[in-house]
Amino acid sequence: MLQLPVYLDNNATTAVDPRVLEVMLPYFTTQYGNAASRSHSFGWVAEEAVDYAREQVAGLIGAVKQEIVFTSGATEAINLAIKGVYETYVASGNHIITCVTEHKAVIDTVKHLEKKGAQVTWLPVDADGLISPAALEAAITPKTILIAIMYANNETGVIQPVKEIGNIAKKHNVIFFCDATQAVGKIPVNVLGDNIDLLTLSAHKMYGPKGVGALYVRRRDPRVRLAAQIDGGGHERGMRSGTLNVPAIAGLGKACELCAREMPEEAIRLRRLRDKLEQGLLQLEASKLNGSVSHRLPQTTNISLNYLEGQTLIMQFAKQIALSSGSACTSASMEPSYVLKAMGLDDTLGRNALRMGVGRFTTEEEIDFVITTITNAVIEMRKISPQWEAFKSGVTQ
């Protein structure tokens, strides 16, 4: 039986997989030791859980466990990566290359460093949401110390040419940081194969708990050094002090293990559901798919439905369907998505966009319901839309 509301906001967060929760529970109750307490069995058990989770996380991205630093989430990991590199290497150069469609956690961190004296090149994207590797390489100077380009976009699912970017960074001896928060667990990611030096991920994007993430820090060829952003005890090899969140870390590890094992089959199922949803909604007149069709995550779609107000449309079925008009960090704003604007969409299409992400627990019955519900809502809203009437009459707006 269909359970309402239907959840299609899996790019914002995912439900914790029951198998993940099962692994976490003992560390709240019977095995509640501090992983830094090395004088008794409670601490040893906690430390062992953290060590095992480190292996699980590393295994998902092709790293070794010594390269994994646990954080409170991707935002903290992003701050540690970008600020940590800048503060460590600023004597060699102060130039950073990034992209206008990065997540706000990257954009705001880089803007903070701009105020501190960093020189920043903001790469544009094309209509598909992709950067130009040639433009990136042309932007490199002798003062470039960091390239910060995301793996997959949180609004459109567009996947950047990461391997090519990594090769360019390697060729010019520039550190490559990749925010892979949306990609890890959805598609194969390999830090060695892609020449990634720093990578962030978050548990709650892949059916783990909120409040925990990780930063991959390359140990050799090159060895990346970071200035700590949180001091106080020297935890995580001096890069991130603070008592480790053992239950959440254990959950992150299990979530990574499940994704590593189930990702190929899961991606096929999610792509089929996403394509069905997309095909159903694109039957609506004056609808537009945003972003690359071929270079994107299997579970994400972003569709603009013209001649109505996107936020108003969402409110029409908010009690029945959970989705968003953009990033969870910016969806409360009435401004059009900065990601879609950067891709060349006008403000109207940007405001009329729906971001939908299917997930591990999405069913075909739910997709059928969503297609019918949104289609009916759009038809009814357009009946009273002056813009729609003008469009149908052939009047140019």
Image: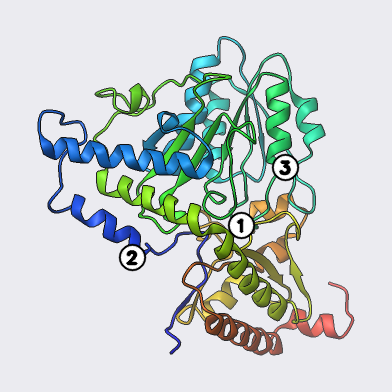
Toward which corner of the image does residue 155 lie, by quadrant?
bottom right
Q: Is residue 228 visible?
A: yes
- Nearer the observer, 127 or 307: 127
**Image height check: is 280 above or below 226?**
below
Q: Name the residue under label 3.
A: 161
Q: Are marks 1 and 3 in contact (CB under 8 Å)?
A: no
Residue 257 as seen in the image, left or right of residue 248: right
Query: Which residue is at a point 49% across and 18% down the rendered structure image?
Result: 87
Q: Which residue is drawn at 31% across and 37% down?
A: 51
* Place of residue 385 in the rendered image (x, y in percent of width and height, measured from the top left): 70, 83
* Residue most extreme to the front: 261
The disc placed on residue 246 is: none
Kindly identify which numbered label has been placed on residue 18: 2
Which residue position holds label 1? 155
- CA distance for labels 2 and 3: 34 Å
What amino acid is labelled 1 in the image? Glu
Relative height, residue 138 to residue 34 (above, below)? above
Helix, strand, or loop for circle 3?
loop
Identify the residue at horizontal 67%, vertical 15% (top origin).
143
Type of amino acid under label 2: Pro
